[in-house]
């Protein structure tokens, strides 16, 4: 079966760096996506990786290793507004998105 | 403003009373999709549509219907709602090529409670 694993919850301190991991086992691979979802709101697109390596976008970076079935989202200079759930999703060989359950990130002052 | 609009945002209904959740996007996107989100589970796809008059089942289509008569609209129909359909529902759309359908624009969500 297809599976996306990510930690349920993480806690970090304002101003620090946090890495949210995502491992996947899917039927084929056509890209990995990260979304941010604040409580009670809709998910919003953060990043897309289809080739191995690091994609940087401001304070957020996303890394992919296809051979290991692994990705991480790196958040730097954490701000209180970064408190949210972070969803990892993989597009399989049928171009369908398989979603992880999300990682709830709690930022403490 | 580019957006996906869902209505209603909140609804409490009773078992068996047919309801429709509307979804409209103003970005001329070809791809549209419905998801449900439940605590501890990832987003689960109900139905999706690659274009007008083209719809396909997702992972959890039982108990739902959809239609895509116009490009901008993709309503979700619950013919006979049951309590296990109590959930948070999201409509989403995406433009570009098939490979780009992972970059989704979501509506604000519709919280449905079936008693």
Image: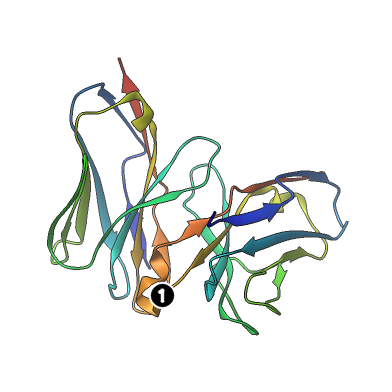
**Between B16 and B98, which is closer to the camera in this rendering?**
B98
Above or below residue A60? Residue A109 is above
Report which quarter residue B33 is drawn in. Answer: bottom right
Judging by the rendered image, the residue that carries numbered circle 1 is B96
Query: For this view, does A60 lie left or right of residue A42?
Result: left
Q: Is residue A85 left or right of residue A78?
A: right
Q: Is residue B35 left or right of residue B69?
A: left
| x then y, percent, for residue A63 | 17, 53
Placement of the C terminus of chain B among the 4 image quadrants: top right
Locate residue B50, reporting x and y percent: 53, 79
Residue at point 71%, 80% (across, down) = B69
B28 left or right of A70? right
Location of residue B6 in the rendering, given as x and y in whole percent from the top left corner: 67, 54
Q: Nearer the viewer, residue B45 or B4?
A: B4
Front-most of residues B111 and A25: B111
Residue drawn where x is 67% and y is 69% of the image: B73
- Circle 1 residues within 10 Å: few <14, some 14–19, many ≥20: few
Looking at this view, name the residue that lies furthest to the bottom: B53
Query: Which x, y percent locates residue B109?
Result: 61, 48
- Between B57 and B73, the one lying in front of the other is B73
Q: Please tell me whether residue B91 is drawn above or below residue A11 in the rendered image.
A: below
Q: Which quadrant does the N terminus of chain B fall into?
A: bottom right
Letter of the chain that mark 1 sits on in the rendering: B
């Amino acid at each position: 079966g297809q599976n996306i694993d990510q930690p349920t919850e993480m806690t970090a301190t304002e101003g620090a760096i946090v890495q949210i991991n995502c491992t996947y086992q899917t039927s084929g691979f056509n890209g990995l996506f990260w979304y941010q979802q604040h409580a009670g709101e809709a998910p919003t697109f953060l990043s897309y990786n289809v080739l191995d390596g690091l994609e940087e976008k401001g304070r957020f970076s996303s890394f992919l290793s296809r051979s290991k079935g692994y990705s991480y989202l790196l958040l730097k200079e954490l701000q209180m507004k970064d408190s949210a759930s972070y969803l990892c999703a993989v597009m399989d060989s049928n171009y369908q998105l398989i979603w992880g359950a999300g990682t709830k990130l709690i930022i403490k002052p | 403003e580019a957006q996906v609009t869902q209505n209603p945002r909140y609804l409490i209904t009773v078992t068996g009373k047919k309801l429709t959740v509307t979804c409209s996007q103003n970005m001329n996107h070809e791809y549209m999709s419905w998801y449900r989100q439940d605590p501890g589970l990832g987003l689960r796809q109900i139905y999706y549509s690659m274009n007008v008059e083209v719809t396909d089942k997702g992972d959890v289509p039982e108990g739902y219907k959809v239609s895509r008569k116009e490009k901008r609209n993709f309503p979700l129909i619950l013919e006979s709602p049951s309590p296990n359909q109590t959930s948070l529902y999201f409509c989403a759309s995406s433009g570009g090529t098939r490979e780009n359908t992972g970059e989704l624009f979501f509506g604000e969500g519709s919280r449905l409670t079936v008693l």
